[in-house]
Amino acid sequence: MPTDGRSALNWNYTPEQIDSETKAYVASKKQLLDRIAALSDSDATFDSVIVPLGQDENDTSTTLGVVTFFQHVSSDVALRDASTAAEQTLQEFEIECGMREDVFKVVDVVFKKTDRAALAPEDRRLLEKIHRDYRRDGLALPKPQLEELKTIRKRLAELSILFSRNLNEADVDRTFTRDELLGMPDDFLEGLETKEVDGETVYVVTTKYPDLFPVLTLAKREETRKKLNIAYDTRCKENIALLEEAIQLRHQAAQLLGYPNHAAFVLEEKMAKTPEKVGDFLSDMRQRLLPLGKSEIETFKNYQRETKQDLGEAPGDGAIYSWDYRFYMNQVKEREYNVDDEAVKQYFSMENVTNGMLDIYQTVLGLRFVETKDAPIWHSEVRVFEVWDSKTNDFIGHFYLDLFPRKGKYNHAACFPIRSGSLLADGSYSTPVAAMVANFSKPTPNAPSLLKHDEVTTYFHELGHVMHGLCSQTKWSRFHGTSTENDFVEAPSQMLENWCWEPEVLRGFSGHYETGAPIPDDLLNRLTKSKNVCAGLFNLRQIFFSLFDLSVHTQAGGKVDSVALWRSMREDVTLIRDVDSSAETWPAAGFGHIMGGYDAGYYGYMWSQVFSADMFYSRFKKEGVMNPKTGHDYRIEILKPGGSRDGMEHLKAFLGREPKIDPFFKSLGLN
């Protein structure tokens, strides 16, 4: 396809420009929808209705990608505010567009009279998706039911905001003496607020993650961990009522639309397709992981006896509780693998890791990266790379790396697709643009930026999403890159994480930041062996969250006692007890995923992990992790199609068969 050659995006915006471009887009899209709505049944065809809708998405991809991106990266607060306001305007407008009954009537005419089998596969998918979107928004319902659905959806949006706000604003803490915090490092204690109680200095520990996780991981006294964990699991009791109301309303909405339950509604658009398939998958995974989980619990119990003996504490009831999980997992990691994160990171400087990673992606995927020093950027620390096909020399697109923290910037690691690849009206191809945004530690006067191994893995994973966007080539922007089913989207990047556990790969981009010496074999071996530390219990925990999520969204009538259900399922699935008889807790009040877009979708993490293992162990591990032929197949069959066909079709094409779950268990050392 000829490309449009627009490689450099403009980042020289004012808040007023963001506002005016957003308004111009809204006005133009409204005119388009009005024109379509005015068509007679005889004039309504695929070319007069569906093509203009798809073309509009293609043509506006760049504008919308840029104006909504500023909120995450700009150092100018006015630009960030304008970008956030633009995103809100666009979201509200998209909801309004999705409720245009006059447009749906015309789309419905086209859907019913078009010979779909005669369309090219990606065109057929576009027609089916546009029609399904309207139907899932209830536009095929009689007026009274449609109004009821709108009321339910509005209330669900309110419940989600309230649930999230309660969690964000929950200000829960507990105080501990120095002795109660035995095992905590000095630098952690120095960062805590202190106060005097009865002439003794006590430390204030909150239930926010930067306090919670270190204490649950390192504090030796069980009573300390228990006290903080129970404080965490008794936050926001009011969220239980919000959660249960949301579950019931989701059920009602699904039934209005003709689905048996909310899970069936959600899964229709996923790779898994049905609740039954997800349930069978989770049950199978659970049965296979139970023996490993049970043996890990026995290891925990041995360490528990030793720890209590060393501290002179009573033996307790011998159960492993939720406040023990992180502590004994860390004990296993330290004692059995002896991996010191601080020692490891001396060998992974940002420069070495970045160069090594880019070399791997170039070799495996058949790409060539050229850094451009004169392209416009939004901050001086940002790097820009052009991407070319190493065989054909075709220009593919470009990507940005924005890797260090600064004030007002997005504070996690993520890939942002800024422009989708797509075919423009003039026949040229709009090349994709993506950015990787992260917050790795900055260089200091004495040392470069150094990455812990889990940060190296995060880097590789997010850069994998960037490669997905760049290697994808679709006609319609809505199918480009990572616009796949939600339960497939993580699989390509999870697959690429495996390179971070391959000794020869790690050796290749390691080098002590002072001496340049490669990472010692002994340290490298301990690190790579620690990959599957407590994998049985870790994965059973993921299965529990997934089963709880699936269960509440398939309950008859949508009625659920979430506290009782959580308690009955927790130990049964995870082998870990939630609480002893001394306390009442309601952990579901803090299960943010279920109210934040992952409802009936939490299983997707495990689902994609299993298929990523199949891709890696069945092809790359057998044929060579740096094998360009395997990499080419991966690029063509997994990355290139984006969401233009089902993820299951990608997998079958790459694997040459239906995907299996066995390689995942092999990766854990299980048969």
Image (tube, rainbow, N blue to C red):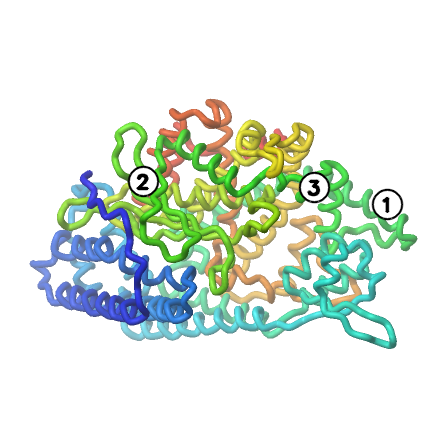
Q: Is residue 547 above or below residue 40?
A: above
Callout 1 crowding tier (Cα within 10 Å): few <14, some 14–19, many ≥20: few
Residue sitting farthest toward the front: 445
Quick one: quadrant of the C terminus?
top right
Measure how far apart labels 2 and 3 are at the Cα level.
41 Å
Q: Amino acid at mark 2?
A: Pro
C-alpha distance separating marks 3 and 1: 22 Å
Q: Position of residue 592 (x, y in %)?
A: 55, 62
Q: Is residue 439 above or below residue 29?
A: above
Q: Earlier in the sequence, mark 2 or mark 3?
A: 3
Residue depicted at 39% across the width and 50% down the height:
435
Dot 3 or dot 1, earlier in sequence: 1
Residue type highlighted by circle 1: Glu
Q: Secondary structure at mark 2?
A: loop
Residue corresponding to mark 2: 641
* Chain-order first, disc 2 or disc 1: 1
* Residue to which mark 1 is pinned: 306
**Pointer 2 local density, CA inside 10 Å: few below 14, some 14–19, many at least 20:** many
Image coordinates for residue 245, horizontal then vertical, percent: 51, 71
Q: Is residue 75 left or right of residue 236?
A: left
Q: Nearer the viewer, residue 280 or 155?
A: 155
Label 3: which secondary element: loop
Q: Which mark is residue 340?
A: 3
CA distance for labels 2 and 1: 54 Å
Q: How many marks?
A: 3
Q: Nearer the viewer, mark 2 or mark 3?
A: 3
- Tell me if 109 is positioned left or right of 436 in this view: left
Would residue 111 appear left or right of 43 to someone viewing this image?
right
- The answer to whether residue 280 is seen in the rendering is no
- Does residue 392 appear in this view? yes
Residue drawn at point x = 72 percent, y = 52 percent = 217
Mark 3 or 1: the one toward you: 3
